[in-house]
Image (cartoon, rainbow, N blue to C red):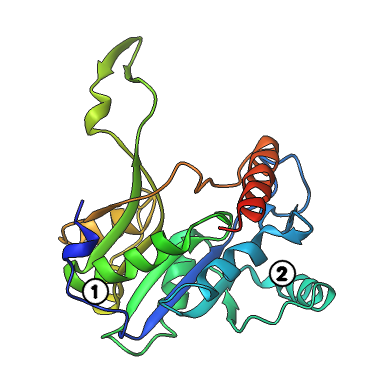
Amino acid sequence: MPNLQSLTSNLSNKNYAIIVAGGSGSRMQSVLPKQFIELCGEPVLMHTIRAFSKSDAAPQIILALNGSYHELWAELREKHNFNIQHTVIAGGETRFHSVKNALDTITDTNAIVAVHDAVRPLTSKQTIDESYLVASTTGTAVTAVKSRDSIRQLNGEVSICLDREGIYLVQTPQTFEASLLKQAYEQPYTNMFTDDASVVEKAGAHITLIEGSHSNIKITFPEDIIIAEALLNKKAISGS
């Protein structure tokens, strides 16, 4: 991972953030998509958008949201008096297609674009700003953390131990030069594209990892809300 202090770039680039909000409530045992579930009194999605709005990168925010939820989102914004500027576009059939739809609205190929999960509301300002800085220098910046657990790989009925020192768990934001990301998303879709890094790597680019945080959790299961609320309350108490 690159040393942030060694970078000579700054945050003068035109920055964008694509927030992908295509998740359902199935694994949350909820009829409401998880990005709308309340976290400390506000929908998860509002915390996520606010994190980017408070960064020094100050990106233009594009929310890729399933069209059937645009009206609900408008109602929630009014209810919570949420006025952080962002553009709402229609999401696609898959995450890949949602990102592609958002990229089609960005005409500046010299921009830096971060793609972020709507249900990662605890991403730090430092991580966001570092992702833009590194991507402006190397072309790519993918947030990841080292595995804390032992890793085993299952092949049929046989499992083998893997060296966890070389294993990283990928998070978001995943940030790229716009020209590189747009070119990568011209590729035909395949179910091997599990995130933006996999799309860009398939197009032939080198992926640079930056250090994330284990608190940058993805809201997936009901217990994740409890953990996220505890982390947010701790942050509020500490004033960080």
Residue 149's label in the rendered image is none
Q: Is residue 11 above or below residue 148?
A: below
> Helix, strand or loop at disc 1?
helix
Q: Nearer the viewer, mark 2 or mark 1?
A: 1
Nearer to the camera, 93 or 54: 54
* Amino acid under disc 1: Ser
Residue 78 image point, x, y percent:
81, 79
Residue 163 image point, x, y percent:
23, 23
Residue 50 image point, x, y percent:
60, 70
Q: Residue at x 73, y 77 (%)?
A: 82
CA gap between label 2 and label 1 equals 35 Å
Q: Is residue 195 above or below residue 56?
A: above
Nearer to the camera, 207 or 80: 80
Residue that carries the numbered disc 1 in the rendered image: 136
* Amino acid under disc 2: Ser
Q: Residue at x 61, y 43 (%)?
A: 220
> Helix, strand or loop at disc 2?
helix
Corner quadrant of residue 10: bottom left
Nearer to the camera, 238 or 167: 238
Q: Residue at x 42, y 46 (%)?
A: 213
Residue 68's label in the rendered image is 2
Query: The C terminus appears in which quarter of the rendering?
Result: bottom right
Side (left or right) of 116 relative to 22: left
Residue 46 image point, x, y percent:
66, 66
Residue at the farthest top position: 158
Count the labels in the image: 2
Q: Residue at x 46, y 80 (%)?
A: 58
* Mark 2 crowd level (few <14, some 14–19, many ≥20, 10 Å Cα): few
